[in-house]
Image (spheres, rainbow, N blue to C red):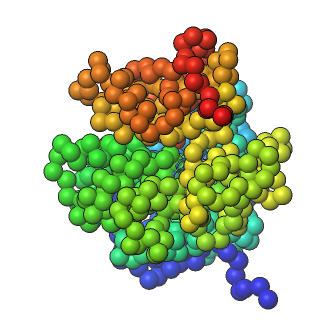
Amino acid sequence: MPGGTDQTLRPFLWRATNLYSDTEIVSRNHDGMQRYTYSEYEGRTSQLANALDEYGIESGDRVGTFCWNHSRHFETYFAVPSIGAQLHTINPLLPDAHIQYIVDNADDELIFVDQSLASKLAGAVADADDEFDGVDFVVMGHEAADDLEATPYESFIEGHATDYDWPDVDEDQPAGMCYTSGTTGNPKGVEYTQQMLWSHTMASQTPQGIPMADDDVVMPVVPMFHVNAWGMPFTATAGGAKQVFPGPSPEPEDLATLIENEGVTISAGVPTVWLGLMEYCSEHDVDLSTLETVIVGGSAAPKSMVEWFDTQGVEVLHAWGMTEMAPIGSVSHLKSDLATADYDTQVEKRSKQGLVVPGLEFKVIDDDGEEIVWNGQEFGELWIRGPWVTTEYFERPEANEADFEDGWLKTGDVVTVDKDGYIKIVDREKDVIKSGGEWISSVELENAIMAHDGVAEAAVVGVPHERWQERPVAFVVPAEGADRETLVDEINELLADEYPKWWLPDEIEFIKEVPKTATGKFSKKDIREEYADQSLVEGQVPDEAAPDRN
Ligand code: ADP
């Protein structure tokens, strides 16, 4: 017997507005701080839904957003899917050509855009052929935009009724959409049905996920323009938590102020965000006492970050996920039988990408097509499946063939799994360095190098090599005040202590900054392109560039 209703987002909104009508939503908006309650939120979300109806958005239509994290963006999060339409969040940090491709591919009818991002979008529109034909714009706030013909959001919703009879939407109805950043080729679209977002929210709410309750104050720093800010606006609403949105381009100072003023208990972001906050805290007196949990994901959380937050009484939850899975896949909770393990062992475990969340299954397949043994040593590609893991890309049959098999998503992440079931990402498949037919983890080398005080950032890439196929080269951004004279030797010594000689980078080069992708990750593709002509030739490398096979 099926249940009485489909699995949709509507009950989460219903619960928050009926059980927690006075709980606050606080937002650093372009036009100043905004503070209102779930009850007012539902009123404005209803106004938006009525306005979308009047505009002519129908079930199945796509509505784009080009926005930072703020309350108006949050209003689109429930209004658009709950009228049966599809919320397509667009990453404004992408190059214009990708934005044009995405809007065209998704066939957006209407795009909500931030004041501060309107000129960026206008640039993409101006250069476009016909990708934006028939697309209208609404600019977030009271004012019109300078460079873009757009209706101000407040005029768009003004005068509309503050209630809405939210319909029964089919759980298979696409509710959300996001494109992967496209590290190769054009971005690939992933559609999230109502059921996928519902099940992702429910799994997030389990103790093994990233649960959020009515005594929490939740601040997603991870952008709402990429994979629904890891689903946090939905999870926080389901739990009735107070929500704090840090607004356009938040700086560490903005985050520190919001944590202090609003009593934030849970926040989430990529490692770069937390490195920025840690640095800010070392120079300023910041009160982090309300903060209980920091969720770190998108890229590997360095051990030193886990340890630093421990000293502040804040638990780091290291999470792994992908656009293709809305995105949460694993979280580094400590298993109960590790509660008595020594601190180093615990940190070791907590720094891994963690335990798969309830509802998913995974397997790890090696180069021979066999499943690996869970011994923390053998590695292979992580395959995963579950109710919120997509099984196809939007209109990309050729990509489907490469990335999906028998209902499994082939993640492209190379991992080990230890006997306790902790997944550890050792590399992206395309970033693994193949030296002399053997394998070197660029991620491990990067983390080891970044553990040196004199290093701000480091990226290690494989550079083509005549004899060994590829050899590692490290690109290092020295920290302020670091002694550059001795840094290379010190890094080499540090690595030599931990890794076999053939793992050591052939060269360590200083650079000003590691180029980043539109989702804030190190862009090895850009580094490779920039340094592609620097193929290493025989003689520049130590003899021992492959393991001793004897
Ligand atoms: P893109 O940045 O290309 O859009 P996603 O945002 O979907 O891609 O990122 C997914 C990828 O990010 C994963 O496949 C993995 O390689 C990497 N990733 C995500 N979380 C972590 C983590 N905690 N540690 C290491 N890598 C991670």
Q: Which quadrant does the N terminus fall into?
A: bottom right
Residue 438 in percent (x, y) is at 66, 34
Say which of 390 and 138 sits in front.
Answer: 390
Say which of 549 and 61 sits in front.
Answer: 549
The residue at 75%/56% (across/down) is 371
The residue at 35%/23% (across/down) is 489
Residue 496 in percent (x, y) is at 43, 32
The residue at 38%/30% (across/down) is 493
**Residue 477 shows in this picture:** yes
**Most distant residue in the left direction:** 285
Residue 302 in percent (x, y) is at 41, 47
**Residue 394 shows in this picture:** no
Q: Is residue 281 left or right of residue 467?
A: left
Give the total number of marks visible in the rendering: 0
Q: Is residue 404 left or right of residue 157?
A: right
The residue at 39%/77% (across/down) is 214
The answer to whether 87 is drawn above or below residue 535 in the figure is below
Say which of 172 and 56 sits in front.
Answer: 172
The answer to whether 292 is drawn above or below residue 497 in the figure is below
Say which of 544 and 309 sits in front.
Answer: 544
Residue 319 in percent (x, y) is at 51, 57
**Most distant residue in the bottom direction:** 1
Q: Is residue 437 left or right of residue 538?
A: right
Q: Which quadrant does the C terminus fall into?
A: top right
The answer to whether 20 is drawn above or below residue 346 in the figure is below
